[in-house]
Amino acid sequence: MSLNKTAYNAVWSEHQAGRGANEISSALLKILEKVVQDFPLLENITLWSDSCVPQNRNSIMVTALKYFLQNNHYALKTIEQKFCEPGHSSIQEVDSVHSQIEKALSVSEIYSPVSLLRVLTKVRKKSMKIIELQPGDFLNFQATSQSFKFSEVPFTKVKYIRLDVQDPLQVSFKESFVNDDFNDVSIVPKTRKKDKPVVMPKVSVLSKSNILTADKVKDLKAMLKYMPLADRQYYQNVFKNNK
């Protein structure tokens, strides 16, 4: 949810990418790009995430957010990431959006991502934006994160992370929301040569790894005759590129 109560959604299909930390981070950055385009004077963004360490609470996500901070050309100064308690959501507005999507899906027939997009575009027409990710949007932040030292950030315990555009080589965090002070740690590797400046390495496009299995392709082909034309054409194109 944003300042104007708009829900931003990033979607991609199974044959394009999975749901690991690289993919989740890449999707979040596409959403943030849209947010700062809509609010170019925005100086601070607060993210509420679930506490899933493999997807959200890790060095890959922090690297992605730092990459975004250093490469956006807007007024953004800080990004804060807060983590909900497992089993609890702190953002009721998001729960409302999820409920509306589930309600729409329960009375719809979904044959393919094309069908899904048809449904999503009808949910909250005036206050929801759908961002379709393309293969080139998925970036390998995991490889980039290995250029830094995150060993002093206890990701399994952190509740609150703050990143500042003025401190690209520092991570500030709290292990409890009741703490007043942040722990500030440097992510500069000790092995770095003192006369060599540390900059954010280039981030490469993530290699495609999510190829549909032969069994899944076989099952989908058997179902083509039951699908609307647009969905059949979508899968036929997927099959051609599923190599």
Image (cartoon, helix red, strand yellow):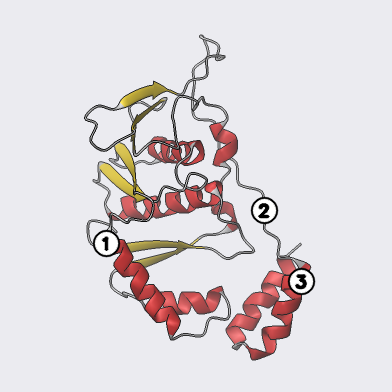
Q: Is residue 221 above or below residue 206?
A: below
Q: Is residue 20 above or below residue 70?
A: below
Label disc, if present, on residue 208 of the rendered structure = 2
Amino acid type, mark 2? Lys
Q: Does the residue at mark 3 contact the one at mark 2 (Cβ under 8 Å)? A: no
Amino acid type, mark 3? Asp
Position of the C terminus by quadrant: bottom right
Work out whether residue 212 or residue 70 is closer to the camera in this orientation and state it. 212
Residue at image location 38% in from the left, 41% down from the top: 72
- 2 or 1: tag closer to the N-terminus: 1
Occupied quadrant, residue 238: bottom right
> Total label count?
3
Residue under label 1, please give it: 92
Circle 3 crowding by C-alpha within 10 Å: few under 14, some 14–19, many from 20? few
Mark 2 and mark 1: Cα distance apart in space: 35 Å
Residue at image location 56% in from the left, 46% down from the top: 139
Amino acid type, mark 1? Gln
Can you name the residue that lies furthest to the front here? Answer: 87
- Element assignment for label 1: helix
Q: Is residue 217 above or below residue 23?
A: below
Residue under label 3, please give it: 215
- 3 or 2: tag closer to the N-terminus: 2
- 3 or 1: tag closer to the N-terminus: 1
Can you name the residue that lies furthest to the top here? Answer: 194
Circle 2 crowding by C-alpha within 10 Å: few under 14, some 14–19, many from 20? few
Residue at image location 45% in from the left, 42% down from the top: 57
